[in-house]
Image: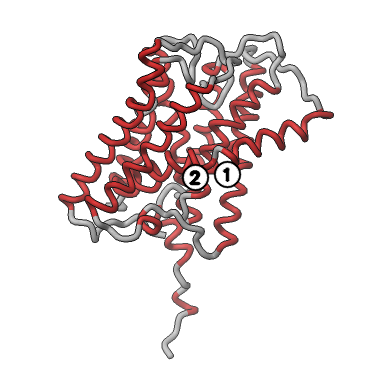
Amino acid sequence: MTLSTKHVPLVNRRRGLFIFLGVAYLGMWAAMSPLLASGYQRGDAREETGALQEVCISAAMLAPALAAILVVRWVERSGRVRDTLALRWSKPWGRTARACLLAFIVPAGLTTAALVISTFAGRYQFGGVHWNGLGSWATSAVLGMLVSLPLFFGEELGWQGYLFPRLAQGGDRRSLIRAYAITGVAFALWHLPTLLMGGQYPGRPWYVSVPAMVVSCLLILPVFTWLRLRSGSVVPAVIGHAFVSSVSVAMVTEFADSKSTLDPLHMSMVGWPGWIATGALVAFLALTGRLQPSFYRDRAAPHPASSHKL
C-alpha cells in the first residue's frame, strides 16, 4: 500500500493540514461546550455517562472526519474521499478481514496484560472471572462496541485516514517519526476538553491527565497505524480504536473487585501498566519494520524471478 500524496500541491497540503486541525479542534470544543459551561466533572471511573454527555461525546467524535472530508473535497481536491481516506475494504479481502480480527485480539491481549501487571503491582484488586456470565457479558460488550462503531469512523477518518498519511508522505525515516509523533500528540491534545472534565482520568488534575494522555496516544497510535498499513484500509484501525475505548474500559470494571476503587492511571490501557504492554508491542513492530509503509509495499510487490514479458 502507499500513503503518498505527492499529486497534491505542497501549498494545498499545508493549508489542508492547518484547516483540518482547526476544524477538528473547534468541533471538539464546540461539542463539549455545554458540559464545560455546566461545570461537569467525572469523579469516579464507575460513573455512568448521562444523556447529555453521550450526545456531546458523539458530536465531538464526528469532528475529525468532517474536517478531513472538508479538506479533501474543497481544499486539496485530491480525488474520491473513500480512496483518499482509505475508507474501503481493500483486496485481497482476506488480508483486511485478518486485520479486523487482530483489531479485536490485540487490544484484548494488551488490556489483559495491563491488568495482570497492575494486579502483581498491587494496584488492581482482581475480583475473579465469573465464568457463568462471561459469555453474555462479552457478547453484550462487543455488540455495544459495534453499535458505536460509526462514531469511531468519525475519529479515525481524521487521524489515520487524513493526518498521518499527510505527515508521512515523504516516506523516509525522519518523515515517519515526525508523523507518528505529531499525530500522536495532536490525537491526545484533541481530548483536552474531556481531560479537563476528568473523562479519561477521573479525579486527576489536568497537569497529570494531559501528559498521561499524550503518552497513551503516542503508544497506541502506532498500533492503530499498523492495522491500517497491513490492511490498506482504515476499517481495522476503527475497530481497534473502538475496542480500546469501550470493551477495554469495560474489562477493567468487569474483572475488578466490586468494592474496589478504580484508577485508570494505575490499571488500564491509558495507565502505566498499559504503557508497558503497549510499549513492548510497539517496540516489536518498530524493530521488525512493520510500522513502515514500505514493509507492506515490498511484500505485495511481485518477486523479480516470477515476472516475465509476454
Q: Is residue 194 visible?
A: yes
The crowding category of the residue bearing disc 2, from other C-alpha atoms within 10 Å (few below 14, some 14 to 19, many at least 20), is many
The crowding category of the residue bearing disc 1, from other C-alpha atoms within 10 Å (few below 14, some 14 to 19, many at least 20), is many
Q: Is residue 122 above or below residue 159?
A: above
Image x and y of residue 52, in percent: 48, 22
Q: Is residue 126 above or below residue 285?
A: above
| Left or right: residue 297 compared with residue 14 | right
Q: Is residue 223 visible?
A: no
In front of the other: 82 or 260: 82
Q: CA distance from mark 1 to mark 2?
A: 7 Å
Image x and y of residue 264, in percent: 55, 18
Image x and y of residue 102, in percent: 60, 46
Image x and y of residue 91, in percent: 51, 64
**Amino acid type at mark 2:** Ala
**Which image quadrant for residue 22?**
top left
**Amino acid type at mark 1:** Ala
Return the residue found at the far bottom.
310
In front of the other: 257 or 158: 158
For label 1, the residue is 103
- Of the 4 image quadrants, the one containing the C terminus is bottom left
* Tag 1 near tag 2, CB within 8 Å: yes
In front of the other: 265 or 240: 240
In front of the other: 251 or 115: 251
User: Which residue is depicted at the point 33% across and 26% down?
Assistant: 30
User: Which residue is depicted at the point 35% across and 42% down?
Assistant: 66
User: Could you say which disc has been placed on residue 237 in the image?
Assistant: 2
User: Could you say which disc has been placed on residue 150 in the image?
Assistant: none
